[in-house]
């Protein structure tokens, strides 16, 4: 039998999807599983979006191939709402509609990276960033942060990580998995560092509408208005509760978009037209439903912080954005408090098997000793699940 690609030895599956799938399987078997793993809102997609999608499904014009870069009406709406909500102006021609944010990220890396060029990724990182870099032939280089620094990196750290092969800095604020939010001052200093070193910033802005404390982080595109060094990734998955509709987008300059269009033309031809119409409906109807979700998420955030701060052996961060909290659980990982548990990966297996609560281990995000806890789940499940964690740790010696 012929060999498979060597890439099989370098890339890992998505741990968040793996944990979510395991939780669903156990739940289907009748186990009372509460899942904190999935990064998706528990709210249904708004009714008006569904109605517009139904109408689109009945319209023969949407039964055929459409432009590779996306429906013109959707790209125009993306440009309009980007200027309105994100405070930078882009042309619809600078937009490529993709099958969710993941495809946008992979396409961006393939568009700008040559083999072995390096991408700086702050830790903790979302699991897809380093694997996407590897798929594109690049090399991920990591910059450490910790709970004491609120999981933020500095220019001094970036300087140490930079060399002649450095091509891209991955940027996300609010952060997945920590919920950390950089201040305008902190972010602008890092932007200027990247621009002065002629390094791309890949800015993941999917959580921009979920900031609960302090000022929002400005996009690098508010400074780099010609997108000479900036690539934006965004989408409707989080802010409009549309994870399953699979619509994201890439915003970049003409050179990047031209390459990205070529890649997409051979990869997927175009995104589902029905989903594109749904995404347009989401954007043009504004943020009323998003703000309702934001209010609910903030209440859950405060509840989660309160419970975790009272849980023995846990040190929690104070997330200001997204819908994640990232507690340090290293105090229980000595192999003695819980027999055979010496890593956060072991702990997650123990928690799901013994207490029927599913978290994603810190190893998935490059930082062992932590758990990612999504609070984008129902209030009752949140309370019950965190109570189980509290009780489980309270019974340890």
Image (tube, rainbow, N blue to C red):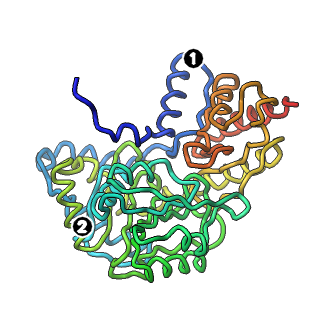
In the drawing, what numbered circle is on residue 18? none
Tell whether 308 sits left or right of 292.
right
Q: Earlier in the sequence, mark 1 or mark 2?
A: 1
In the drawing, what numbered circle is on residue 257? 2
Q: With respect to residue 104, does 149 lie above or below?
A: below
Tell whether 310 sits left or right of 255.
right
Residue 248 makes an appearance in the image: no
Q: Check contact, mark 1 vs mark 2: CB within 8 A.
A: no
Mark 1 and mark 2: Cα distance apart in space: 48 Å
Task: Please state the horizontal and vertical placement of residue 91, each as a whole percent of the image.
Answer: 26, 75
- Write the residue at 42% across / 70% down: 201
Residue 161 makes an appearance in the image: yes
Residues 243 and 60: in front is 243
Task: Please state the horizontal and vertical placement of residue 180, each as a whole percent of the image.
Answer: 62, 61
- The residue most toward the top is 29
Q: Which residue is mark 1?
A: 30
SS state under label 1:
loop
Task: Please state the horizontal and vertical placement of residue 82, each as a whole percent of the image.
Answer: 38, 71
SS state under label 2:
helix
- Write the residue at 61% across / 60% down: 144
Residues 71 and 266: in front is 266
Task: Please state the horizontal and vertical placement of residue 27, each as a whole percent of the image.
Answer: 55, 23
């Amino acid at each position: 039998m012929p060999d498979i690609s060597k890439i099989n030895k370098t890339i890992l599956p998505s741990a968040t999807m793996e944990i979510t799938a395991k939780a669903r399987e156990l739940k289907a078997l009748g186990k009372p599983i509460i899942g904190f793993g999935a990064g998706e809102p528990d709210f249904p997609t708004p009714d008006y979006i569904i109605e517009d999608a139904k109408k689109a499904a009945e319209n023969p014009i949407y039964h055929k191939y459409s432009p590779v870069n996306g429906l013109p009406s959707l790209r125009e709406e993306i440009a309009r709402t980007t200027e309105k909500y994100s405070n930078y102006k882009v042309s619809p021609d600078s937009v490529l509609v993709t099958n969710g944010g993941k495809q946008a990220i992979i396409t961006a890396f393939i568009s700008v990276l040559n083999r072995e060029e390096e991408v700086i990724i702050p830790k903790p990182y979302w699991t897809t960033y380093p694997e996407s870099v590897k798929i594109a032939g690049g090399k991920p280089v990591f910059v450490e942060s910790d709970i004491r620094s609120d999981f933020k990196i500095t220019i001094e750290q970036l300087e140490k990580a930079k060399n002649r092969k450095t091509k891209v800095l991955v940027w996300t604020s609010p952060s997945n998995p920590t919920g950390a939010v950089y201040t305008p001052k902190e972010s602008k200093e890092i932007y200027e560092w990247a621009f002065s070193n002629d390094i791309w910033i890949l800015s993941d802005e999917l959580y921009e509408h979920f900031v609960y404390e302090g000022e929002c982080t400005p996009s690098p595109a508010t400074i780099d208005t010609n997108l000479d060094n900036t690539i934006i990734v965004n989408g409707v998955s989080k802010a409009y509760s549309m994870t399953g509709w699979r619509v994201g987008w890439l915003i970049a300059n003409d050179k990047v978009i031209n390459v990205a269009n070529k890649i997409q033309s051979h990869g997927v031809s175009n995104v589902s037209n029905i989903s594109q119409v749904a995404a347009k409906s989401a954007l043009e109807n504004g943020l009323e439903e998003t703000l309702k979700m934001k209010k609910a998420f903030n209440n859950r955030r405060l509840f989660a912080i309160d419970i975790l701060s009272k849980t023995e052996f846990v040190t929690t961060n104070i997330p200001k954005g997204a819908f994640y909290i990232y507690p340090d659980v290293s105090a229980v990982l000595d192999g003695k408090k819980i027999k055979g548990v010496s890593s956060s990966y072991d702990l997650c297996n123990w928690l799901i098997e013994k207490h029927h609560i599913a978290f994603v281990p810190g190893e998935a995000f490059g930082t062992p000793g932590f758990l990612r806890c999504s609070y984008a789940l129902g209030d009752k499940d949140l309370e019950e699940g965190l109570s189980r964690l509290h009780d489980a740790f309270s019974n340890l010696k």
